[in-house]
Image: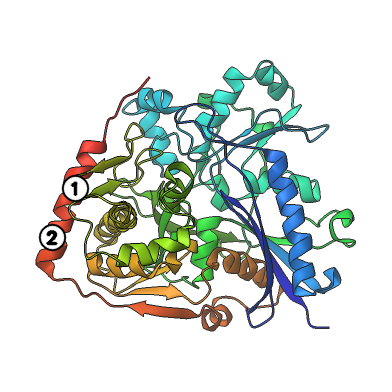
Amino acid sequence: MESVVGAIDAGTSGVRFVVFDRDARKIGSWHVPVALTYPRPGWVEQDPAALVAATRGAVREGLKRARIEPQRVVAIGIANQRETIIAWERATGRPVYPAIVWQDRRTADRCGALAGTALGERIVQQTGLPIDPYFSATKIAWLLEHVPGLARRAAGGDVLFGTVDAWLLWSLTGEHLTDATNASRTLLYDLNDGEYSPELLDAFGVPPACLPQVRPSLSTFGKTHPELLGCAVPIAGVLGDQQAALIGHAAFRPGEAKATWGTGAFLLAHTGDRPVRSAHRLLSTIAHSSPEGGLRYALEGSVFCAGAALTWLRDGLGIVADAGQTDAMARSISSSEGLCFVPALSGLGAPHWDPTARGALLGITAGTRREHVVRAALEGIAFQTHDVVRAMESDLGAPFSELRVDGGVSRNDFLCQIESDLLGIPVVRAALTETTALGAAFAAGWTAGVWDGPDALRPLARTGKRFAPSLSRADRDALLAKWCDAVERAKAWRFE
């Protein structure tokens, strides 16, 4: 029987399991949604137990749908939502608090107090990251300060912390491990040394023994408990979801880049064996690591709200029944009629980094209809992506010849077209929009010997529809000027 490779894609809105054959063709998948909760303004949480249950359910049902016996799975890769932090008891595996999701803004004041200080500058230099609630360390510090008895229990080694990959690995294999891509998002990891910084651990009050051991992304992290599938299957690749998508595009050369439109929008460009320090507040991060090749770096721009804006239109406002309707609705009108939507529902990420910004819908008139709001929301995703691309091009010293895109929202033709129009370059959609899962499978298969490195993977990263720019420079400049004005109006919004 031919062997297959599995991929767990533990995203923000749910967990997907995908099965791939040796030609990297998807032969089955299953998705289990996981709810987010918003207990206070700016707070975003998730049930850790629901993440594990969704993962187990997705793996079992995905194999069943693909009609694959578990014994045929040579390896499973994990790609996960990053920066989300979970704390659990070492002895029982029970979570001690809901997962604090990457979108959460509760530590904005602490981050503001650190910014501009000597410690803040050292954090930026060591980690390659700006001081922002997005990252894990201030979330851990908040838990230690606000959960009764947690600091004492953590100091005694009774409580463990980890990002979603570490939590799933513990639950599926019993190992307390993470990889370099996820560790590099914690504000605790020295980007140059490739290990946790004792100085930063002390600054945030995090006991080192509570954190997972860092392993290379392309390595074996353990085997699943037999009760999951009836046999033990190696977990042979772990990456943060955006780094997994970069591998899914087979972007291994410096300068190769991609944008993933999911809950947020994330642009990564490979920078080779050295980190690039950004002049535009983009992130220096790990692209992947391997036992043979060591660390490989990337430059990243993170936009907090992309598909989340469409989810809000559906669930919050009720003006669409399904996000898939938005493409036709946006095309049903010739323009947004001056309406501009800044989707800063969880603050602004790169290149603005304003956690106090909030969503803004500007230019409303008595003639504004729901189609205008939908079109403006899609344009808002494209505008944010444009800003990051331009900043990234400046940092890298070269323009992009095209932008490769993936993720569920990339299925929207209107969004792909308006992005191409704003950038003035082609936008190329991946043939498989589940590129994050493909990258996790590539990592697992590469580690397990199914595929022999980048040269074998490049032909398997297939492209789909190509969108060419069609907007005049004058019209593009007018749209961008309106957007820049709207962004400034959305910043520094204070509320109690």
Q: In 3D space, how far apart are the residues under numbered discs 2 and 1 (Cα atoms)?
A: 10 Å
Q: Position of residue 275 (x, y in %)?
A: 40, 54
Of the pair 121 and 458, the residue shown nearer to us: 458
How are the residues colored?
rainbow
Of the pair 339 and 291, the residue shown nearer to us: 339
Residue found 66% across the figure and 38% down from its top? 47
Residue type, numbered disc 2:
Asp
Is residue 449 in view from this perspective? yes
Residue found 54% across the figure and 24% down from its top? 142
> Residue 175, relative to residue 145: is it above or below?
below
| Quadrant of the frame with the C terminus | top left
| Quadrant of the frame with the N terminus | bottom right
Residue type, numbered disc 1:
Cys
Q: Position of residue 14 (x, y in %)?
A: 61, 52
Of the pair 302 and 327, the residue shown nearer to us: 327
Q: Is residue 447 left or right of residue 419?
A: right
Instruction: Answer few, some or many: residues within 10 Å of disc 1's Cα (few below 14, many 20 plus, some between 14 and 19).
Output: few
User: Which badge, 2 or 1, is on the more N-terminal residue?
Assistant: 2
Q: Secondary structure at mark 2?
A: helix
Q: Which residue is mark 1?
A: 484
Residue found 68% across the figure and 39% down from its top? 48
Instruction: Answer few, some or many: residues within 10 Å of disc 2's Cα (few below 14, many 20 plus, some between 14 and 19).
Output: few
Q: Which residue is mark 2?
A: 477
User: Does the CB distance between marks 2 and 1 fall below 8 Å?
Assistant: no
Q: Hey, which quadrant is residue 112 in on the image?
A: top left
